[in-house]
Amino acid sequence: MKQHNYIATITWTGNRGSGTDHYKNYERSHRISIDGKAEIEGSSDPAFLGDPNKHNPEELLLASLSSCHMLWYLHFCSVNKIIVEEYVDHATAIMLEEESGKGRFKEVTLNPSVRVKDSTMIAEAIELHQKASEYCFIANSVNFPVLHKPNISINTSS
């Protein structure tokens, strides 16, 4: 089995001068840095006093699941001669928060809209979403369902 290692540096940037002396006295702002790549400005969800203009961990997990699925899907389409012309996923997630403040994701639903070159590719294009799901590293690492509701179409203006 191959092993792949990843390194990220997360730096808290939200100290307003008194550190974490009170729940409402510090920002949840942070910077996500990976060598050689653009930094991502993060925060917590606004429900937890985060900055609504910055990415939060829940959104990033959702984006990771959607991206991983898409990349495997495009790979399998390519090797199976399914020509994808467009792919857009409007993914959604449901997170549950307990009275104690603990929380967890209940489920994620991927809603990819895929345009393929011609109608003979539609059936296999639908099937390949299942295969992508089986291979997605991120989906295989979470403890909640990742559902798929693909919509496959062809370009009718050609």
Image: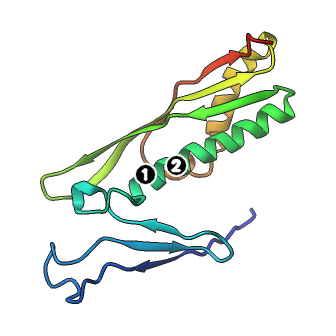
Task: Indicate left or right for 138 with 153 as reference.
Answer: left
Q: Secondary structure at mark 1?
A: helix
Image x and y of residue 91, in percent: 48, 37
Name the residue tied to disc 1: 59
Estimate the spatial distance between the alpha carbons at disc 2 and disc 1, rounded to whole Å. 6 Å
Residue 140 sits above or below residue 113 on the image:
below
Residue 22, image quadrant: bottom left
Task: Identify which amino acid the numbered label 2 is placed on.
Answer: Ala
Dot 2, how many residues are within 10 Å of its Cα: few (below 14), some (14-19), or many (20+)? some
x 83%, y 34%: residue: 78
Question: Which residue does the numbered mark 2 point to in the structure image?
Answer: 63
Q: Nearer the viewer, residue 71 or 114?
A: 114
Say which element carries label 2.
helix
Residue 3 position within the rendered picture, expressed as x and y whole percent measured from the top left:
71, 67
In this image, 45 relative to 80: left or right?
A: left
Residues at marks 2 and 1 touching, judged by CB atoms closer than 8 Å: yes
Q: Along the line of sight, which residue is nearer the eye, 81 or 118?
A: 118
| Vertical comparison of 58 with 3: above or below | above
Image coords of residue 73 (percent x, y): 70, 36
What amino acid type is highlighted by mark number 1?
Answer: Glu
Tell me which colouring the rendered structure shows.
rainbow
Q: Which is more toward the observer, 56 or 93? A: 56
Identify which residue is drawn at 43% across, 48% down. Answer: 143
Q: Quadrant of residue 24?
A: bottom left
* Residue that sits furthest to the bottom in the current view: 17
